Amino acid sequence: MTDAFLASLPAFKKLPAEALAELSRKLILRNYRKGEPIFAENSPADAVYLLRAGLIKAVKYSPSSELSSMEIIGPRQLFGMIAVMDNKPYPVSAIPIAACEAYRIPAKIFAALLAEYPDFSKQVYSSVGDHLRQAQALRALSAETVERRIAHILLVLSESMGKILLIRREDIAELAGCSPETAIRTLIAFRKKGIISSGWKRVTILDPLRLKKMTQSE
């Protein structure tokens, strides 16, 4: 039986029906608690993961043990594939910032799909490019204002979650590298400007163009 969630995703739509059905039988769906590593930096890359629900941050430790967020991973996104494709250890740790569900695709199965199905491979490489661009953007924003960092995070989340983001303000603060109080003040300012509306564990983006403009250098 084919997994309907897999069948709805651009990369897996490229697979023949038989291959998709076989993959559906082999995948393992696992629940992870907040803060429970899905994989750790420098551990062997033995699988690629697909986030079904929840939110994950990809983080890296500096030589001085300082933690920095490298990427935000939302639902419907593959992650861990760069290390598997390069046959190298995972370069980051994947940490849920909320309880999540993720499929585990063993490295051998993923490599076989890449080798056998060019259209699937093309879609995966496009996804890799998106991951690299996001990581570069986050690094560039690390020295920017909190307002600009939070605007960027909201835009990134909207790409996978849509305009209604089911996320706590504390989680936004964690991703932006600021205190919850600072994140709350920033979100209130956005709300007063008509850029977002917010409620209990929910942020709705009303004006994505203004958010995008905030992230751009003047």
Image (cartoon, helix red, strand yellow):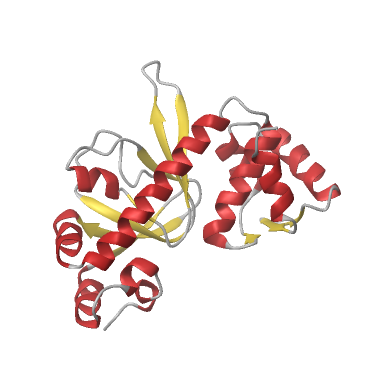
- Residue furthest front in the image: 218
Quadrant hosting residue 19: bottom left
The vertical placement of 44 against 81, above or below, is: above
Q: Position of residue 152 (x, y in %)?
A: 61, 43
State the residue in front, 12 or 52. Answer: 12
Identify which residue is drawn at 70% across, 44% down.
Answer: 213
Identify which residue is drawn at 40% across, 42% down.
Answer: 132
State left or right for residue 197 relative to residue 44: right
Q: Position of residue 153 (x, y in %)?
A: 59, 45
Quadrant hosting residue 50: bottom left
State left or right for residue 150 relative to residue 23: right
Picture quarter with the C terminus: top right
State the residue in front, 181 or 143. Answer: 143
Identify which residue is drawn at 55% across, 61% down.
Answer: 161
Q: Position of residue 144 (x, y in %)?
A: 63, 28
The vertical placement of 108 against 169, above or below, is: below
Identify which residue is drawn at 48% across, 57% down.
Answer: 54
- Residue furthest top in the image: 64
State the residue in front, 192 or 27. Answer: 192
Picture quarter with the N terminus: bottom left
State left or right for residue 69 relative to residue 36: right
Q: Position of residue 8 (x, y in %)?
A: 41, 75
State the residue in front, 122 or 84. Answer: 122
Total marks shown come to 0
